[in-house]
Image: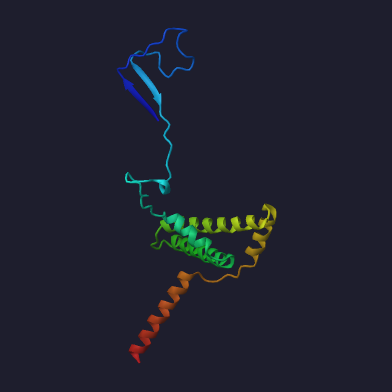
């Protein structure tokens, strides 16, 4: 951070001042470099000595939730999210209404899950090459199934049809 203080007359004669002076050659302006250390929010302390309340960020809460799941659950969630992304692409191509922010949210969620999965592989000592090989095998073994949102729509339609059949009967 730079701060300028105008009006302080600091002059150095040639050869008498330090070699790396913080003043400029222009008389009356001093340029000072301030380096402020950032204090982590968790370490922040109020004026009475008690720690301040710190809220966990949404991303950290999601990561904590992801890390609590097993690898199989993570794989299932990746498959579901990729199916949801496919459904969004279909909605976009059919020019249906959809939330464009869902693309970014789902992609980031998939990336977080895959990152946690890779962290676990590193902990197990699986190298990059073997990891890619296992990932290709896993992708080939995926059984295509409808995403949860489509299942939900199908269930809702079936319930509506059952309600209509009950009314007409």
Q: Residue at x 35, y 85 (%)?
A: 164
> Furthest residue to the bottom?
169
The N terminus lies in quadrant:
top left
Q: Is residue 92 visible?
A: yes
> Observer-nearest residue: 119 or 114?
119
In the rendered image, which quarter is residue 17 located in? Answer: top left
The reply, left or right, for residue 29 in relation to residue 149 is: left
Compared across the picture, whether 5 is left or right of 13 comes to left
- Residue 60 left/right relative to 52: right
Furthest toward the left, the residue is 7
- Horizontal and vertical percent position of residue 80: 52, 66
Spot occupied by residue 59 in the image (x, y as percentages of width and height) = 45, 55
Residue 110 to residue 29: above or below: below
Quadrant of the rendered image containing residue 25:
top left
Quadrant the C terminus occupies = bottom left
Q: How many marks?
A: 0
Residue 74 picture location, percent across and down: 55, 64
Residue drawn where x is 38% and y is 11% of the image = 11
Q: Is residue 106 visible?
A: no
| Protein image colouring | rainbow
Extreme residue in the top direction: 14
Quadrant in the rendering for residue 160: bottom left
Residue at 40 percent of width and 61 percent of height:
98
Above or below — where is 91 with respect to 18? below
Q: Nearer the viewer, residue 35 or 88?
A: 35
Tell which of 125 and 36 is nearer to you.
Answer: 36
Could you tell whether 24 is left or right of 48 in the image? right
């Amino acid at each position: 951070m730079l701060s300028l203080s105008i009006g302080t007359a600091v002059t150095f004669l040639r050869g008498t001042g330090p070699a790396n002076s913080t003043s400029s050659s222009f008389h009356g302006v001093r340029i000072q470099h301030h380096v402020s250390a950032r204090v982590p929010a968790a370490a922040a302390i109020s004026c009475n000595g008690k720690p301040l309340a710190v809220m966990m960020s949404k991303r950290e809460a999601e990561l904590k939730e992801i890390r609590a799941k097993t690898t199989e659950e993570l794989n299932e969630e990746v498959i579901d999210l990729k199916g949801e992304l496919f459904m969004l692409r279909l909605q976009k191509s059919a020019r249906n209404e959809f939330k464009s922010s869902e693309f970014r949210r789902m992609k980031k969620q998939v990336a977080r899950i895959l990152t946690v999965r890779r962290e676990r592989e590193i902990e197990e000592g699986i190298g990059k090459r073997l990891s890619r090989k296992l990932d290709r095998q896993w992708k080939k073994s995926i059984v295509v199934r409808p995403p949860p949102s489509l299942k939900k729509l199908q269930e809702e339609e079936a319930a509506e049809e059952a309600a209509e059949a009950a009314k007409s009967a």
